[in-house]
Amino acid sequence: MSRPASETADPLVDLRRDLHRHPEPAWREFYTTARIVEELERIGVDELYVGSEAIPGGRAGVPDEDELEAWFERAAAAGADPVVLESLSGGHTGAVAVLRRGEGPTVGLRVDIDALPREESADDDHVPAAEGFRSETGAMHACGHDAHAAIGVGVLAVIAESDFSGTFKVFFQPAEEIIGGGQAMAESGHLDDVEYLLCLHVGLDHPTGEVVAGVEGFLAVAQFEAKFEGEAAHAGGHPNKGRNAVQAAASAIQNLYGIPRHEAGSTRVNAGVVRGGTASNIIAEEAVVEGEVRGETTALMEYVRERAERVLDGAATMHDCGVEVEWDGEAPSAESDDALADVVAESAREVEGVDSILDSADLGGSEDATFLMRHVQERGGLASYVGIGTTHPGGHHTATFDVDESSIRIGVEVLSRAILAVGERRP
Amino acid sequence: MSRPASETADPLVDLRRDLHRHPEPAWREFYTTARIVEELERIGVDELYVGSEAIPGGRAGVPDEDELEAWFERAAAAGADPVVLESLSGGHTGAVAVLRRGEGPTVGLRVDIDALPREESADDDHVPAAEGFRSETGAMHACGHDAHAAIGVGVLAVIAESDFSGTFKVFFQPAEEIIGGGQAMAESGHLDDVEYLLCLHVGLDHPTGEVVAGVEGFLAVAQFEAKFEGEAAHAGGHPNKGRNAVQAAASAIQNLYGIPRHEAGSTRVNAGVVRGGTASNIIAEEAVVEGEVRGETTALMEYVRERAERVLDGAATMHDCGVEVEWDGEAPSAESDDALADVVAESAREVEGVDSILDSADLGGSEDATFLMRHVQERGGLASYVGIGTTHPGGHHTATFDVDESSIRIGVEVLSRAILAVGERRP
Amino acid sequence: MSRPASETADPLVDLRRDLHRHPEPAWREFYTTARIVEELERIGVDELYVGSEAIPGGRAGVPDEDELEAWFERAAAAGADPVVLESLSGGHTGAVAVLRRGEGPTVGLRVDIDALPREESADDDHVPAAEGFRSETGAMHACGHDAHAAIGVGVLAVIAESDFSGTFKVFFQPAEEIIGGGQAMAESGHLDDVEYLLCLHVGLDHPTGEVVAGVEGFLAVAQFEAKFEGEAAHAGGHPNKGRNAVQAAASAIQNLYGIPRHEAGSTRVNAGVVRGGTASNIIAEEAVVEGEVRGETTALMEYVRERAERVLDGAATMHDCGVEVEWDGEAPSAESDDALADVVAESAREVEGVDSILDSADLGGSEDATFLMRHVQERGGLASYVGIGTTHPGGHHTATFDVDESSIRIGVEVLSRAILAVGERRP
Amino acid sequence: MSRPASETADPLVDLRRDLHRHPEPAWREFYTTARIVEELERIGVDELYVGSEAIPGGRAGVPDEDELEAWFERAAAAGADPVVLESLSGGHTGAVAVLRRGEGPTVGLRVDIDALPREESADDDHVPAAEGFRSETGAMHACGHDAHAAIGVGVLAVIAESDFSGTFKVFFQPAEEIIGGGQAMAESGHLDDVEYLLCLHVGLDHPTGEVVAGVEGFLAVAQFEAKFEGEAAHAGGHPNKGRNAVQAAASAIQNLYGIPRHEAGSTRVNAGVVRGGTASNIIAEEAVVEGEVRGETTALMEYVRERAERVLDGAATMHDCGVEVEWDGEAPSAESDDALADVVAESAREVEGVDSILDSADLGGSEDATFLMRHVQERGGLASYVGIGTTHPGGHHTATFDVDESSIRIGVEVLSRAILAVGERRP
């Protein structure tokens, strides 16, 4: 794999920049996984599971072969290790690294590694553009998963060198953005013996130096794709012969946003993507709405889901169309455990550069890390989702999002210290 | 240009099938124009204008260079004459053929040659699929312009061999489907001396053997693209921060279809294409609606247009979005002249296979032939738009549209006889 | 019955003004019928059918008892003849007057007599306000039925004095505006022997002095009341517990107006009235939409009706409401017979003040006179709907509508002459 | 005032039932105020302010004179004291009762007394119907204000008999349901010296025996009336000439419900009432939407309000209508003070029949008591809003709402004890 020599003083920053230059969306993290595996092998781990060994089944939202093939080729062309690549073929991305160091507890760290299908800013004041590591793939690390991957590698290196006693696993999870990898990773078997699970996210509107010991307020989420099927007709000649899928979709969108709020807590609904029709003079035969529903609890999410299905049905009925609704990308709500969050908070206090520690704060969004957290909690373990502040110029998922790279080191230190403390104390 | 040897007994049918196999959308008629020019040269014409000599300026809706390049290459690979191709470079498609045969009147025949950007049926009972001349380009001749081109060539051959006295011009016009070529052809200068203009369309729900001497009821039309600009935000974390372009587009679509009917005559409105948003969990920053408005008269079309602009503005206002509306693809209404239609009707009576002649019938759609008709009529000439019945299994613009090839010969005979009669009689 | 002495030189104008001051909506024409009967008795007729003798059954849209009682009392207070009133009790309004004058054909004239439930302008330049005969009931003769009634009486008086040979019937029909009386009158039996039927309307955007011999373009119509039933809930405390009938109604209205146009001819749809909900802080339990569908033919009207039902259903489904749709107020399309219209046109030519005669013109609206016309035509008779121009300042159904009273005399003359001609000629 | 003799063993229950039989909406509480004053005079108070002495100005939402007159007459006919009635003329309802008992603190109790404009259930299992005190006015005490008034009277009687030291004021506030009386009462001057304010509500889904010491979660609210003005036209004849106010209102309603949720907390929006149009065949000239916006904080309410105005504007623009929006009925958010709530909780513990005490619970709705609470708090005083559980068969504001009358005694005891404790302890 040919890459420029280190451009910064910090190899983790170099790694993050390299991943940032090669962002890959869900199940297409070929270059990303190969690059991570290269680092893991350099560090040395006791067990390493890659591709279908990491995630044996149950992947949601895997793209079609052509799409996979195109990204696979791109990764190869960018210099990804062909041997590793081979094991990822078919979109079997992701990896699990294991250190086995004696008698202590089994501790896990989960980081997500996928990017978003959006363009990155080319503005001069957007650091990746100015410093030459702007995306080369058309996708973008607009949510900091490049930093997550770097922190995961960094923590592994620290624990490997430490006197940690126990088993330590890092889960490099693909496809978080489409809520496609979390459940599959949770059910991979690798989580079954984990007693303590830490997850992490950078940013979330917390500045560099702030740490959230146990993030709360995960909204349960489910994503849908509704396909309206009507009948095409010439809009000038036969307006009455069409069954208008675009009109049905528009009616659905209007009424989806009108789903009532719920007295018991926060809900969300979004029709994020719409596409339909073939030409301005043809009544549209087909239209697709991609959207999502969320709730502060899983029950609240289900409330919105039930209402959304009713709306989609009614909109199709109105315009004599059929509609098929596929639900996918589902994640439950979850809670961080205070006992584990307390350890994180205490550990953070000792880290230079940390000047604000919040016991908890709301995510206000969704995360498929909740699958892993619940998997561990249901088996009697503890989980906490840690926020590592990073001053970010643009909002998450926008074209000018970027991380303050000094937070990578902070993240590594906070999490390493917390893991060592867990190893000693078993909270 | 290498092609299979004649597959049928009729060279015009062969030509039609060849064009059917290589359908090309607006301003991409590279193979089509080259193939027609080849036939024209074989027949022998007095003057031949190709590319920018046929249409010097004013083309609407020309695609971008990459798109043009891709279709140009495809045409070359399919065996189009490289010399002709060169003259079409940049999307300068179309041709005008002229026979100069003495003192008589100047008579024009206009045929359109472009295809539609839609897939063709692969069903066994779809003749082009069964007989091996289904589209190879991804586009489709779903409106019979392949037959139009063949008829244009056939009529030219007949007139060339006849004792016609006068000047005869055939206009092979590109880009009718996007209403992009008519005005440009009308203003090319080649129409300025035309005293009698015939246009033609096959099918229109008239069966083989039926001829409409003078089609009426052209709806004036204008097409628009409305681009809503909002602001992206995470739908879970910051629902209030977005300015939702998909919601604005949905509201616009709903209300566009609600534009009131008009007491003075038929109107139409269609939102044929919608696309917007990037992901199910992001509030959409941008959404585009492509649509059209029509009216039985140009004034009625303008009525709908004015209402549509109001709706688009209001929808943007509602959701705090901006909207830019571009109008394009505009064609006026027009009337066939009875005096010329009468000649067509009389000529049709003599043609074998014609068993029903209608003086007039409604198109119920739009056509940019109206630009050419009005151009001729404004200079004191006469124009008629002739319907040549063809039994078609699927509707116009649908995947199973096809022409009954026996109507090609009928079209050639009806139009040739009419042109000869016009040469003699000057109606 | 005490009324002011004649205020104008013309007793028919006095009658019209008296009726204008006492406008009564459908099935509440108590004063109106009584006043007409008074005139009929003064003129002297051979047979007179009032109330349930005029219309024995099948009345649509009769209001409830309280409403009927209130208008009945008002009519009594205004001085209507108590004996006649008694026979109208229960909303049995309307009358049929018959002259039997020998061997000739049976000719009918139908006039409608009801008013609209809307307020009348009080502006100084509104003649009824300025001249002191503005409505005193809250309703308004905003469509000229006061003039129709006066013309009906006037024609009867002329024929009674003439040497007409045959039978002449005048049908004073209630409840045209709600399309409630036409079918009932058609099926009353009184039409069964009518060989020639004339109907009339003043105005319709034709100025005084213009006559339309045979109006065409009656749109078939059907009216509906859709009642959405949801569930009330406190909008602040329990937004999720409501099933929102106002939201369902709004969605229905939006999509009703979006019912596609039809290639085969004109259609219309209107949601004319909406009401729902009880308080701004309560999710509405019930909402009602009153609307109508129309078509150039009965088939086109049925097309819109079918689409409307689909929309109403879908809107209810979307918001978990029930919906009950009642269809009422239905009238078919109809055609004037040329042979009878020709007689009208010829008769109009002899009338002073008539300066423009149109063979036909489009109504562009609906009329339940079509029931009577079809009833006669189905039995082999002829019917024509005659337009008597009257210059009207405001549009039909608006607060400033008024008739030019000089058109009353023109109407009487045109129709009388036509009836006499029919009696002689049996066209 | 003639009333049946006591029907139950408890005079407060008798009072409640009498008020329940004579429910009066906002600013029409003539009988109610007179009846309360009668009780106050019986008990004996030191100062009594009635009508404009209680609320000198600033009343919002006062109905028109005819409406006031009708209710005034009804109250007189029902036996209200004519002398008291006189002082309420013009809708100056409400009263303030004052006990002056020495040196201690000034403590206030606020109860609201108005009813809702809705019909009451006549079902046999609805106690007021079964027991003969169902509403006789067409309005309904569907939110328990009849019980509030009785409790206010009851507490006053207890304090009057007690050894309370200080000043005690009871505010009998009109027009809570339309958020019309709170601000006016707050600014009446009578609150200026109040150091401790208690407010109360029965029910709120808390069963009999449960007490909420300090209710939280008041949503700030503002109510609007949006009047769309278009232009009428005949829907059949001139569909293009109308400017459709019903269509604008429907579009507004659809999009009001689509106002995005806010990350910072709960919001609400409701279009509770819609009415428009005059007839099914007329395009509606006018339509009115009555609705409200709410937010967990005043800022959140303002967010929804700003969005709502945008929607209303855009909907009018779309359909070429004008819109006038009047905002009214506004109340801020507020918080109960823990220190005062603690006293309530402790007092409740001593009351027989109280088996569950909650420190706090969410109202989830709005209340104009918040004006009074903030008025006191801004001057350094403490306020708490107390929930007195009552098992209610139907939800608040529904036709079958009713209170468990045993909770009246509980309310009197809890509040009396709290007031006595405040007098002693000055928390």
Image: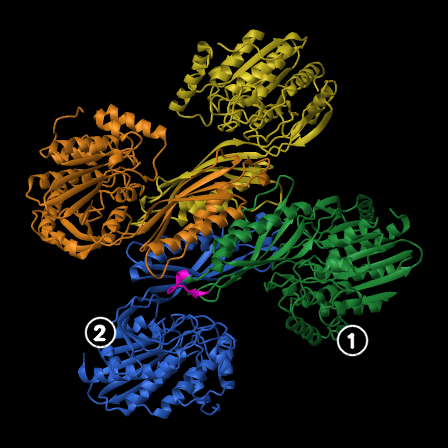
Chain colours: A yellow, B orange, C blue, D green
Q: Determine the residue positioned at 13% across, 40% down.
A: B99
Q: State left or right for residue D9 relative to residue A164.
A: right
Tags 2 and 1 on a common chain: no
Neighbours of disc 2 within 10 Å: few (<14), some (14-19), many (20+): few
Counting from the top left corner in percent of width and height, residue D94 is at: 76, 65
Above or below, C390 against C41 in this view is: above
Residue C379 circle label: 2
Q: Dividing the image into 4 quarters, which one contains the C terminus of chain C?
A: bottom left
Q: Nearer the viewer, residue C249 or C327?
A: C249
Name the residue beneath numbered marker 1. D83
- Identify which amino acid the numbered label 2 is placed on: Arg
Q: Is residue A209 magenta?
A: no
Above or below, B145 against C56 in this view is: above
Write down the chain letter for disc 2.
C
The magenta segment: D232-240
Counting from the top left corner in percent of width and height, residue A290 is at: 46, 36
Counting from the top left corner in percent of width and height, residue A355 is at: 74, 24
Counting from the top left corner in percent of width and height, residue B423 is at: 10, 49
